[in-house]
Image (spheres, helix red, strand yellow):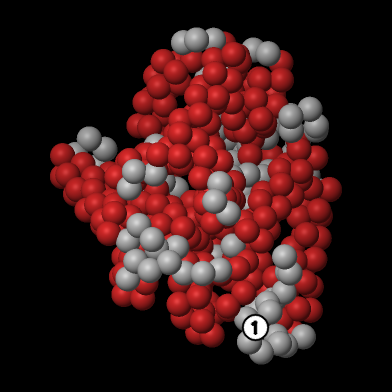
Amino acid sequence: MSSEPTSGRDPSWRLRVYPFALLVALGGALLLAVLSYDRDHPTTRLGGDYPSFYAAGSIALAGDWGELYSAERQSAEQAGLIDDEGGYLYFSYPPFVAGAYGALAVFDYSVSFLLHTVLMTLALVAAIRLLWPRLESIGWPFPALLVLAMAFYPMLRAVPGGQNTTVSLLLLALAVRLERDDAPFWAGVALAGLLFKPQFGVVIVPLLLLTRRWRVLAGWATGAGALAIVSGWLMGGMWLGDWWEQAGAFRDQNVVANGANFISLPGFFENLLGTGETTAFVVGYGAATVFGLAVAYFWWRHPRSHHLERYALAGAAVVLAAPQTLYYDAGLLLLGLAAVAAVVKENGVRVIGPLAALSWVHIVADDLGWSPLGPLVWVAAGWLIWRLVRSRGGQPTPV
């Protein structure tokens, strides 16, 4: 598969040279930050939220699974990695995620962070490659589209910030490609990988049931079962109860610590109106239900629409409906922009460019106490449904 567009005008050499130069500059800045990092100097904090993943990986590497969700142990493992003495960044993922990060914990923190950033960048590269049959209609070369994706504030902060948004994006893109290649079972296995964030992985199940995509659902069930077995093997048969207990406790703390970064409908209104407020619950989950029903209707009404269109809407539903989605994961809406790229054709960049610029409104979230990116994401998701319904009418799109 060619990495360059095969139709339309040949892109200007600037679209090849400038993005490449910018990527090299970003890589140089990252390497400089790693080389200048001093764990004993709190002003050189590195990696955003990565200390929580590194600490969990260290606990897993030591085999101390009984202490994986211990506040004291996580705090001790993160000593010197964050600039909050006595504090810590909580790890709230299933055990198999900690096991995966154990492979990175064998390295010194700065090296581990660099490797993680490279891996998250490669996940974004792979996602774009998988979606290239649709993206090439924009008429830009691959490096330019990679830079354009990184220009979105959530993605720019996620990749070097120790987050794993690009993994979610890659899994959805992989499911799209596998369904296109008539491998629905393996598409379901890829979708089960989203259970590394359980609130993300379960959203897809009602859509698969509604549209009776049994082979995809069988793959999802197989993948989910395998991940549950791995977690049980690592932490013991009662791991789910331990995880659920700590996840509930973390949820309330997270509103205080990260409420201004919430962009999902339930999380946004919980932060805005107050934790435990009935109005926040009704408005947040009510609006999320309405959007979820709209996505479900598209899946049911247009079963022959392109796989990318359906999974783009599923990704948007994940972002909007999950209880406490942080702004990083707005990067999943890039899947929706890829879905409409073929529709708007040469005007694709005229749509994507302004949206990338608007995504930077999140920088004022701390001052406001809430994220203006949240309402922007809701509008973008609503526009995505309207655009796909208006342009596709349920007919399959060849790629």
Which residue is pictured at 39% across the width and 19% down the height? 245
**Is 354 positioned to the left or the right of 97 in the image?**
left
Q: Residue furthest right?
A: 35
Q: Is residue 124 above or below residue 207?
A: below
Which residue is pictured at 37% across the width and 72% down the height? 392
Q: Is residue 340 above or below residue 287?
A: below
Residue 218 screen position, x and y as percent:
45, 34
**Residue nearest the viewer, comparing 341 with 19:** 341
Q: Quadrant of residue 336?
A: bottom left
Residue 31 screen position, x and y as percent:
81, 53
The answer to whether one can see residue 139 in this image is yes
Which residue is pictured at 64% across the width and 12% down the height? 64
**Is 307 positioned to the left or the right of 177 in the image?**
left
**Residue nearest the viewer, comparing 228 with 234:** 228
Tag 1, which secondary structure?
A: loop
**What is the quadrant of the N terminus in the image?**
bottom right
Q: Quadrant of residue 95?
A: top right
Mark 1: amino acid: Ser
Q: Determine which residue is flagged by label 1.
A: 7
